[in-house]
Image (tube, rainbow, N blue to C red):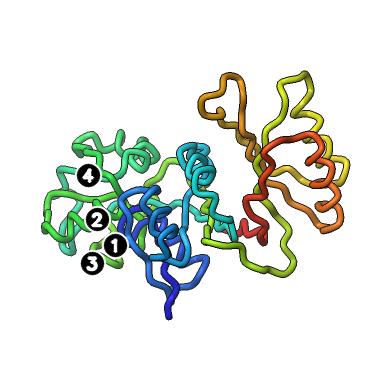
Amino acid sequence: MSIKVAIQGVKGSFHEEAAYKYFGEDIETVECESFKKTCELLKHGKVTYIAMAIENSIAGSLLPNYNLLRDYRFPIVGEVYLHIKLHLMALPGVAFQDIRFVESHPIALQQCNDYLEENPQLKVSEAEDTAGSARKVSEQQLKDTAAIAPQLAAKLYGLEILERRIETNKKNYTRFLILASKPEETDKVNKASLSFQTGNGVGSLSTVLHCFAEQHINLSKIQSMPVLGKRNEYDFYVDVEWKNQKDYDAAIRQVLKYTSNFNIMGEYVKNDKV
């Protein structure tokens, strides 16, 4: 039975590309119109995994997805980083001078702002999905419209790339989490995602972070989110990395003394190659 991976967006999107990069292409991706829908599919056993974007090197953290991690509490079993490359694509045989309209996701359009300013003759319109824009051009045979989307979308929907790498920042990366319905046994884990709360006293968070530093645990990310319905209270989400498992175990024992609602969201193998 093939692995089913829920992705936000349509086939040919960066989420599908991330799923292929992590699992290989011998999988079945399941399109979802929202991140919440991906979680519902996993909750009801319709898919095996979710590939979920969690942060971008330009746009920052996807805060609504932290809420989904909190609400559904699916274990994180892996991660994958994807180099975001955006291309201008159109129907085969269409020349650049024939293009009057360009369509893509608002963030993708923003990331190509310099290119679009250099070509003011192109009328820009926003869409829900980069790959969805490519599919629309293909299905509706729009000869005056180009899409800004990943290379995978051009291949999937039979479009030709007119201009490559039109994104302004060439070092744009997105980190995706791989979520499962239950934890997986993995040898040599060296990264974990944790969540916890601290008191409001002076130095409360600093004390927790010092526990990690004392045990030589690298803190690679920290994100705070307000606790729903509670004024001045926050959930802290941290990613930590280690070389020695005993150091990590010792740090966790110490951190438990100074936190509440502590949760190990996932322990997995660091995978930051792009």
Give the CA distance from mark 4 to mark 2: 10 Å
The amino acid marked with disc number 3 is Gly
Residue 172 seen in render: no
In the picture of the structure, the residue carrying the numbered disc 2 is: 134
- Residue 16 location in percent, x, y? 40, 61
Q: Secondary structure at mark 2?
A: helix
- Which residue is at 33% across, 40% downward? 109
Please report contact status of discs 3 and 1: CB closer than 8 Å, yes or no.
yes
Give the CA distance from mark 4 to mark 1: 15 Å
Give the CA distance from mark 2 to mark 1: 7 Å
Please report contact status of discs 2 and 1: CB closer than 8 Å, yes or no.
yes
Q: Secondary structure at mark 1?
A: helix
Work out whether mark 2 precedes mark 3 in sequence or the reverse, and give the earlier one.
Answer: 2
Mark 2 neighbour density, 10 Å: few (under 14) some (14–19) many (20 or more): many
- Residue 274 location in percent, x, y? 56, 58
The amino acid marked with disc number 2 is Ala
In the picture of the structure, the residue carrying the numbered disc 1 is: 154
| Horizontal relation, residue 14 to residue 72: left or right | left
In the picture of the structure, the residue carrying the numbered disc 4 is: 102
The amino acid marked with disc number 1 is Ala
Residue 99 seen in render: yes
Q: Secondary structure at mark 3?
A: loop
Residue 255, located in which quarter of the rendered image? Answer: top right
Work out whether mark 4 precedes mark 3 in sequence or the reverse, and give the earlier one.
Answer: 4
In the picture of the structure, the residue carrying the numbered disc 3 is: 158
- Which residue is at 51% across, 53% downward? 176
